[in-house]
Amino acid sequence: MNKNEELAPHVNDITRALKGKASEEEVERELQEWLEKYRVDLPTAKRSVVNKLGGDPQDLYIRTEKKIGEITGAEKNLEVKVRIVSITEKNIEVDGEPKKIYYGIFGDDTGTIPFTLWEPLTEELEKGDTVHVINAYATTWNDKPQINIGSRGRMKMLEDGDVPEFKRTPQRCNIMDVREGMRDLIITGRILSLENKIIQTENGEKDLCSGIVADPTGKIQFSAWHDFDLKEDQVIEVEGGYIRSWRGVPQLSFDENASVEVLDDSTVPSGADLEEAGMMTISQLARRGGAVDAIIDAVMIDVKSGSGLIFRCPECNRVVQKSACRIHGKVDGEPDLRVKGILDDGTGALTVIITRDETEKILGYDLDKAMQIARDRMDHGIIKDELEDRLIAQPLRLKGNVTCDDYGLMLIASDVQEKKIDMEKEARRLLDEVRI
């Protein structure tokens, strides 16, 4: 194959992108000049030729135009015409530098889909605007497709009638099964706690009702951005809720676009029964990204450094090392007790923090006695050694909030119980599992 034959498909790409602004012969001459004279790579040469001859380099890419309901999560050069159902600004760090991004929901007559815009907006966009998105790409998150608009992507405003009203298809969901980004949910549960407060927003003061709602599968924090006259211990059905996350923990939100119905009290177990809802495995927590008041049965496999008798900075509460805080320097640390360990339940592992009250219960004595023991032995590490003896390989039932960050899952335990095992019953169960 000669050189002209090798360049032929790329010449065709450029000619197509130029839409009749130059002949194939002119395009070929320009392409060869960029490749041979300026010695740039082929993709750069193609974009440069299109730009020089009056075209848009973005038109080099063959676009995949789809409706939202057709998106699988593997599309490149994606093109959609959509309505903005919601859009929110967020500040993140990239390579140590602050960066502003936008996330929200697109909709059309086939459904809705989450999106993230990774570049600055060229014009203000608001809920309800209709836009033409060009050169986006689709990925999946929690097995659901989402749209990303990067440096090659563009968004153009459209007239309102250019995009049909988006289709809302409410989805009934158990609390255990919610994931970040889910929308148009129907969730039924009992309100276990409730707090009304006034918060300051960009548009002035706004009433917020927040609390915890539970069903037999688990619990979730909620925020109601409209006065639905909610009361503690009510059984409610929320239609039109959506899920956002804080530190990986899914949270239910609903506003004036949602509907809330108070149901018969007998449709959901009592509050006392629901206090024990939320038994989960670590693998379920990893898929979900966290939980409120999760209950875990697991074994402590490691008690890490920084457990036992520790000292905290009186200014910022950080643990001090050798009487020095990494923020405030030399300080007189205040004593505390905690356990920082690793739990494993056979499906996965997570970090656990057991605070002072629960650590005192495990030890059987309080902080003052721990200080006295350490002074008598002249060894602060003696308390950690005792905790290791009591906890390592010990089956435990723990309850608390599970968060998720770059370091993985972390359980802040509010209750720790030694789990009693009927060894004979457990042995029989295991034999039944392996018996042929």
Image (cartoon, rainbow, N blue to C red):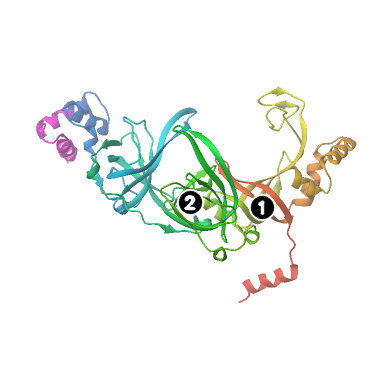
Q: Are marks 1 and 2 in contact (CB under 8 Å)?
A: no
Q: Quadrant of the N terminus?
A: top left
Above or below 299: residue 375: above
Is residue 394 visible to us here? Answer: no
Is 271 positioned to the left or the right of 358 in the image?
Answer: left
Q: Quadrant of the C terminus?
A: bottom right
- Please, what is the three-letter code of the amino acid marked with disc 2? Arg
Foreground residue among 318 and 256: 256
Q: Secondary structure at mark 1?
A: strand
In the rendered image, residue 8 lying in the magenta stretch gets the answer yes
Is 154 positioned to the left or the right of 303 in the image?
Answer: left
- Please, what is the three-letter code of the amino acid marked with disc 1? Lys
Q: Position of residue 282 (x, y in %)?
A: 59, 54
For mark 2, does the 10 Å Cα neighbourhood hold few (<14), some (14 to 19), or many (20 or more) residues?
Answer: many
The residue pinned by badge 1 equals: 399
- Magenta residues? 1-30
> Which residue is depicted at the point 77% across and 48% down?
388
Is residue 428 visible to us here? Answer: yes
Q: Secondary structure at mark 2?
A: loop
Q: Which label was assigned to residue 118?
A: none
Magenta stretch: helix, strand or loop mostly: helix
Is 274 positioned to the left or the right of 373 in the image?
Answer: left
Q: Position of residue 321 (x, y in %)?
A: 73, 30
> Extreme right residue here?
376
> Which residue is depicted at the point 22% across and 44% down?
162
Foreground residue among 51 and 398: 398
Q: Position of residue 244 (x, y in %)?
A: 48, 45
Foreground residue among 360 and 62: 360
Which badge, 1 or 2, is on the more N-terminal residue? 2
Foreground residue among 14 and 167: 167
For mark 1, does the 10 Å Cα neighbourhood hold few (<14), some (14 to 19), or many (20 or more) residues?
Answer: many
Q: Which label was assigned to residue 179?
A: 2
